[in-house]
Image: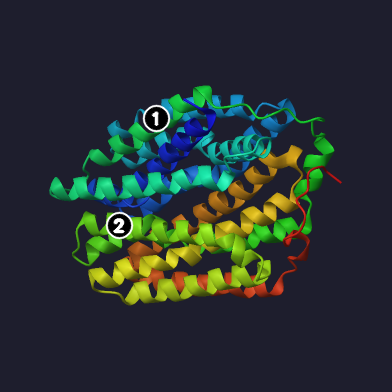
């Protein structure tokens, strides 16, 4: 198997695990009798670990010049923890499994992205975007496939198919990580002072902060979309179809992003993403028919596609290549870690107090407007498109 093929399959399996987890895990926990607050709390555990875990693993990888080896260790750890998920059926047990899993899982994406970016950059042919695309395909395949299987099995509460599907995907990417290509070593290892300076880069931190607010606003979607579908009396098949449509729209947006980037500044792209997302959440809070729910998923092109294209482009220009893993880990830890943690906890509490998932989307719309206001006010010029930075200043 060629290195490019192995990387494609790794992304397919990793984001396949996300496709099996995000739409269906909260409904699975509801089927086990968990309250909204309990669901939010146990799912907040992993994101809370994101900052020390992602930055710690990635900093060690950069310092040792061995991101592929760090990735092998992280995925093996993630698999060892996730083996217990199908047997955890109480809040404390689920929380402990997700805690153990989070000690490594939050480093996987920064590490594999670092490996892929550096490996593809050293040779002609496969590009990062072309390889990462298989992650979106994996998400579609598992989100749709698990939804159809759950429907065929009667949409019963607490169906063990959900943790089993997640575990199978984690096992697949852990095995694939054993033989991923190692990128060429950096000519000079980063110094500790350079890493500290990266953490003090004000324009970069502003970009991270704005992105974290946006991601917190997405938490009701990530955690409660499947619950919302069931509230409306629809099957898990609708959840899977909606998720597949959303990721399909995301893929098209990522493919179109390079041309859009040449025409719009970073601030405009992020404003378009956040403003459209605010409209999406408001409309989703009012949707009652299956076709409305699925059609609104096309706006995921703006919520994630344009957003991710913009921030990856900005990060590649703001962070020197020898600090690539650390920079990507910093972004992932704060945005997908702390942003998720805050959003999950507020979503869980809101679900209980508002007596349903629908009203959460109206509040998410308001939160998204905060992100829009921030991106219009904060200075992002230092991370705007320009020549990529290959070395630290």
**Dots 2 and 1: beta carbons under 8 Å?**
no
Q: Residue at x 36, y 70 (%)?
A: 296
Q: Is residue 54 visible from the viewing direction of this image? A: yes
Residue 70 position, x and y percent, is: 60, 27
Q: What label does residue 364 carry, if any?
A: none
Residue 344 position, x and y percent, is: 45, 55
In depth, the one of 321 and 260 nearer the eye is 260
| Inter-mark Cα distance, 2 to 1 | 25 Å
Quarter occupied by residue 310: bottom right
> Does residue 183 appear to the left or right of 189 in the view shown?
left
Relative to 163, does residue 3 appear above or below in the rendering? above
Could you tell me which secondary element the residue under label 1 belongs to? helix
Lower position in the chain sequence, tag 2 or tag 1: 1
Identify the residue at the far front of this view. Answer: 125
Q: Residue at x 48, y 30 (%)?
A: 6
In depth, the one of 100 and 146 nearer the eye is 146
Q: Circle 2: is it few (<14), some (14-19), or many (20+) Cα within 10 Å?
A: many
Q: In this figure, which residue is indicated by the disc labeled 2?
A: 226
- Of badges 2 and 1, nearer the viewer stands 1
Quarter occupied by residue 118: top right
> Does residue 314 appear to the left or right of 11 in the view shown?
right
Could you tell me which secondary element the residue under label 2 belongs to? helix
Q: In this figure, which residue is indicated by the disc labeled 1?
A: 172
In depth, the one of 305 and 46 nearer the eye is 305
Relative to 296, does residue 102 appear above or below in the rendering? above
Residue 23 position, x and y percent, is: 33, 52
Identify the residue at the far right of this view. Answer: 393
Q: Residue at x 54, y 27 (%)?
A: 180
> Does residue 16 appear to the left or right of 277 in the view shown?
left
Residue 358 position, x and y percent, is: 33, 70
Q: Circle 1: is it few (<14), some (14-19), or many (20+) Cα within 10 Å?
A: some
């Amino acid at each position: 198997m060629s290195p490019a093929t192995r990387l494609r399959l790794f992304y397919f399996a990793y984001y396949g695990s996300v496709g099996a987890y995000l739409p269906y895990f909260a409904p699975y926990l509801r089927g086990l009798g968990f309250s909204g607050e309990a669901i939010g709390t146990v799912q907040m555990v992993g994101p809370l670990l994101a900052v020390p875990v992602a930055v710690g693993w990635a900093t060690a990888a950069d310092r040792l010049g061995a991101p592929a080896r760090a990735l092998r260790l992280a995925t093996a750890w993630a698999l060892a923890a996730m083996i217990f998920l199908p047997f955890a059926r109480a809040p404390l047990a689920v929380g402990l499994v997700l805690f153990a899993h989070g000690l490594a899982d939050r480093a996987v994406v920064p590490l594999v992205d670092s490996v892929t970016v550096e490996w593809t950059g050293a040779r002609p042919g496969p590009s990062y975007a072309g390889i990462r695309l298989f992650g979106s395909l994996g998400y579609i395949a598992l989100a749709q496939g698990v939804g159809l299987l759950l429907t065929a099995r009667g949409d019963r509460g607490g169906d063990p198919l959900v943790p089993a599907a997640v575990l199978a995907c984690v096992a697949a990417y852990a095995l694939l990580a054993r033989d991923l290509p190692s990128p060429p070593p950096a000519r000079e290892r980063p110094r500790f002072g350079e890493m500290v300076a990266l953490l003090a880069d004000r324009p970069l931190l502003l970009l991270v902060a704005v992105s974290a607010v946006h991601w917190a606003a997405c938490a009701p979607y990530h955690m409660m979309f499947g619950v919302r579908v069931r509230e409306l009396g629809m099957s898990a098949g609708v959840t899977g179809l909606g998720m597949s449509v959303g990721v399909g729209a995301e893929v098209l947006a990522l493919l179109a992003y390079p041309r859009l980037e040449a025409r719009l500044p970073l601030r405009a792209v992020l404003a378009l993403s956040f403003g459209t997302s605010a409209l999406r959440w408001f409309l989703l809070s009012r949707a009652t028919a299956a076709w409305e729910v699925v059609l609104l998923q096309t706006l995921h092109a703006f919520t994630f596609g344009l957003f991710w294209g913009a921030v990856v482009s900005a990060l590649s220009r703001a962070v020197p290549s020898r600090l690539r893993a650390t920079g990507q880990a910093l972004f992932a830890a704060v945005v997908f870690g702390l942003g998720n943690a805050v959003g999950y906890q507020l979503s869980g509490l809101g679900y209980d107090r508002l007596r349903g998932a629908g009203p959460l989307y109206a509040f998410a719309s308001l939160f998204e407007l905060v992100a829009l206001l921030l991106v219009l006010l904060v200075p992002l010029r230092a991370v705007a498109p320009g020549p990529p930075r290959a070395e630290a200043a």
